[in-house]
Amino acid sequence: MKIRTMKYIVKEGFANTYKNLLMSLASVSMVIASLLIFGIFLMLIINFTYNLNRLKAQVEIAVFLESDISQLEAGDIELKIKNDERVLAYTKVSKDQAYAQLMNQYLEDSDLLEGLTPDFLSESFRIHLKNADDSAAFTEEISKLPGVEDVSYPYESLKKLSAVLNWINAGSMVVLSLLLIISVSIIANTIKLTVYARRKEIEIMKYVGANDWFIRWPFIIEGVIIGFAGALASFILTCYLYNSVESYVNTHALEYGINDLIKLVPLGNIGGQIFIIYAIIGVVMGSVGSVISVRKHLNV
Amino acid sequence: MIEFRNVTKRYPNGTIGLQDATFTIEKGEFVFIVGPSGSGKSTLLKLMLHEETPTEGEVYVNEFSIHDMPRREVPYLRRGLGVVFQDFRLLPNKTVYENVAFAMQIVEAQPKDIRRQVPVALALVGLSKKAKVYPEQLSGGEQQRVALARAIVNNPSVLLADEPTGNLDPETSWEIMNLLDEINQRGTTVIVATHEKSIVDLMKKRVFNLEYGRIIRDVQEGNYTNED
């Protein structure tokens, strides 16, 4: 294709979009609506995953030893933990330290702990792993070691959180595909109007011997323009909304003292990727809509 | 050169467009196709343009075989054919110059060729002074001349005209026919479907008479009908 043909095609594409401004705007708003709803789901997924991973990394695995364990056996277990490649850091909590912690926690009801001596408590190791995904396997292995009484890890709750995440994932996919279908058909309808408005011109082009693609491309460009404009507008809207939500959540989390627990991903970290995702979806919606319309209504 | 060999065109609704037509039109000929409405004049032209394909038989136009050519070659067939219609089919939002140049732009002609050839075509049809005017400001005859300029600007070897004077008064019709004759003198094959008895009778060209899809008469220097 020659450069001036490309210029012509792009120019015609823009001219088509402009001549059909009202319908083009309607299509653009549909793309914006689709992408915004999709964006809400996307943001939920991103932040859930982010917080889940942060949570996993913060959670420590507590390995409780049998209370009558010998020093030698305890040393063996400590060595195992120390040499395990998956372990980031660990601390040893002696019976006395555990007792002190307990006393501290029940300061006001210390009579509850009457008669309790450090000897009743077990020694334990508090372990942080490098990668939270290793938790299940690590917990399994360590609990089989002789002298280990119990291993505590909030595995079940994390699994439930992951399940919730998967549901949101699946839900957003369903919503996205529904919205895609609606948007594509609305774009196809817009292009149909352009094809109709320009049918005389198209007929002349056919008689003079224009190539099929020479006739088709401007309409596809029109669809791409609509899709991209929608993507750009919804990206700006998403950024604005996300910023508001982020500052709201962060100030309120601080108020309730859970700012360590819940934290939104800063927009700067994900903005670029979000824009690329929006642009791809928008452009694909636009061009698919055009191609459908051109195939149906343009008998070139 | 155009050749039809035992060509039959049946439309899906059962209508016969053309039946067992066989003829040859040599390069540089001028042919009138006459006959009542629905006798197959338009079908004949549509077959040459690959707007329709024959149900039976073979159609050759220039180097193309209409009856078995791939769709992607159709634009190249049409670049060798100029077409003029009864209703002019000009673009109202383009000037006379732009309408003619449009035919060159869409076949990806060089801009410098466009600048050179469009004025030549406009001069040939006598509209050099109206280049910047919009079609609605022109008379019917002038509009048809713009359409003629557009049809010949790419130098087609064949010019097809479907009732080119159908919307024009007798005097203007003569102007258009004289233009077609002049284009023919320059070597272009011209094929005109028409109802204009007086013009056909006076111009003494080759005439095909069509009736119910059959070519019932094919004479050189003929009249509109048999009765002399």
Image (cartoon, coloured by chain):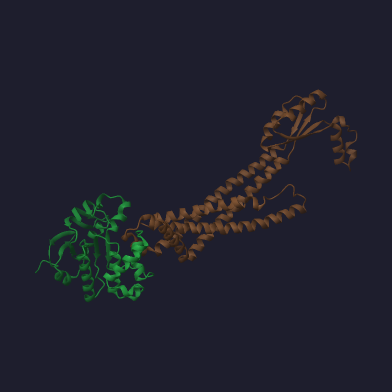
Residue A181 can be seen in this image: no
Q: Position of residue A186 (x, y in %)?
A: 48, 58
Extreme residue toward the left, this view: B228
Residue B10 can be seen in this image: yes
User: The N terminus of chain A appears in which quarter of the rendering?
Assistant: bottom left
Which colour denotes chain A? brown
Chain represented in green: B
Left or right of residue B53, residue B29 in this image = left
**Quarter of the rendering containing residue A240:** bottom right
**Quarter of the rendering containing residue B53:** bottom left
Foreground of the two, A253 or A121: A253
Q: Position of residue B109 (x, y in %)?
A: 35, 60
Q: Position of residue A224 (x, y in %)?
A: 48, 56
Foreground of the two, B88 or B38: B88
Q: Position of residue B224 (x, y in %)?
A: 14, 67
**Quarter of the rendering containing residue B25:** bottom left
Left or right of residue B50, residue B94 in this image = right
User: The C terminus of chain A appears in which quarter of the rendering?
Assistant: bottom left
Foreground of the two, A278 or A29: A278
Left or right of residue B99, residue A111 in this image = right
Figure check: A111 above or below A225 = above
The residue located at (32%, 75%) in the rendering is B129
Q: How many marks?
A: 0
The residue located at (32%, 56%) in the rendering is B75
